[in-house]
Image (cartoon, rainbow, N blue to C red):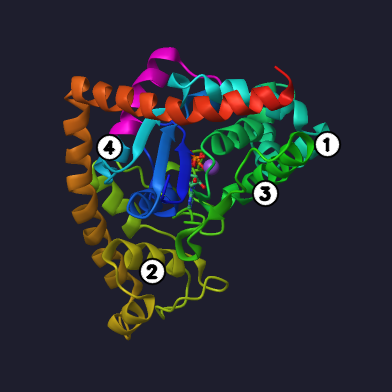
Amino acid sequence: HDRPRALSGIQPTAESFHLGNYLGAVRQYVALQETHDAFYMVVDLHAITVPQDPERLRANTRIAAAQLLAAGLDPERCTLFVQSHVPEHAQLGWVMNCLTGFGEASRMTQFKDKAAKQGADRASVGLFTYPVLQVADILLYQADAVPVGEDQRQHIELTRDLAERFNTRYGQTFTMPSPYIVRETAKIYDLQDPTAKMSKSAATPKGLINLLDEPKVSAKKIKSAVTDTDTVIRFDPENKPGVSNLLTIYATLTGTRIAELEQKYEGKGYGALKTDLAEVLVEWVTPFRARTREYLDDPETLDAILAKGAEKARAVAGETLAQAYERVGF
Ligand code: ADP
Ligand code: NA
């Protein structure tokens, strides 16, 4: 391959992506398909690390794929597929499990957070080893760049450690990947608690913008976003996390610099900023929803895109797996 490789995945664990997924990750997927040989997948194997209803999972996987296409992924310019369609992920995942220290896996902060939410005894072993499956996901494609939000940084570090460990033990096999994290949008915050990241497991649904919600509902959430008791519109994440989060969202959706927005809203109140941002969001999300619908209403096309993607992905993943298995002694 002439271009550097990019690889990333997104979970089908909700009926819709949220604004944090889009700004923190999916936007970068779209940009990197122009410069990279890019592979993007809906990670349904990761989804079952917590209990899933089978029919719901199947539907959410299709919705996730439709949303990736609606966001601008072009199956002619990238490879879009579903993780479970490519068995090499689980196959290399096992090898990586055997290379990972128990203590090393125990230090993954996302596991600690997610396990705590479920009650440590009820968390699955799959949830515990999910970062190791993610290592296999990345290494199978010899990825150079992994576009993700800030919360995934530690998992990319683990990937680098395991790539090096495998290469040292068995001979040069895997490319060393780097996280591709756009600082400005690496962490979009909850609208009701702007010190916590926007997440599908949000404490209150009012803090979370779901991209498939009625635009009116999302507009309302923007208008009732928590800010502070000051009135100045200034980007200051430390002291003004709520306002800063709104400015980040506004700047990114419109391609405006934050300094320009600060100037535009000088002497105006939070109400004006929220009203305008609500409008910006509605204008962006309305066609996005319509495009998602179109893909969902045409299941043959969506299936064909995903089948072709899986075939392209397997060609690369199969080659890497064969080499890795041979090195291990299989
Ligand atoms: P979630 O974290 O909501 O469960 P995923 O784990 O499926 O969602 O994450 C998909 C991608 O979206 C990952 O690259 C993750 O880093 C990114 N992401 C998730 N939440 C945010 C957020 N609030 N801000 C920026 N990026 C995010
Ligand atoms: Na995440």
- Mark 2 lies on a secondary structure that is helix
**Of callouts 1 and 3, the N-terminal one:** 1
Closer to the eye: label 2 or 3? 3
**Of callouts 1 and 2, the N-terminal one:** 1
Looking at the image, residue 162 sits to the left or right of residue 264; the answer is right
Circle 2 packing at 10 Å, graded few (<14), some (14-19), many (20+), is: many
* Number of residue marks: 4
In contact (CB < 8 Å): disc 1 and disc 3: no
CA separation, marks 4 and 1? 40 Å
For the point 46% across and 26% down, the residue is 83
CA separation, marks 1 and 2? 40 Å
Q: Quadrant of residue 140?
A: top right
| Residues in magenta, as a range | 51-66
Report the residue marked by disc 4.
75
Nearer-the-camera pick, 326 or 185: 326
Closer to the eye: label 4 or 3? 4
Looking at the image, residue 23 sits to the left or right of residue 103; the answer is left
Q: Which label was assigned to residue 157?
A: 3
- Mark 3 lies on a secondary structure that is helix
**Does the segment drawn in magenta span residue 65?**
yes
**Of callouts 2 and 3, the N-terminal one:** 3
CA separation, marks 4 and 3? 29 Å
Magenta segment, prevailing SS (helix, strand or loop): helix
**Of callouts 4 and 2, the N-terminal one:** 4
Report the residue marked by disc 1.
103
202 up-or-down from 326: above or below: below
In contact (CB < 8 Å): disc 4 and disc 2: no
- Screen quadrant of the N terminus: top left
- Residue farthest top in this picture: 54
**Of callouts 4 and 1, the N-terminal one:** 4
For the point 66% across and 33% down, the residue is 132
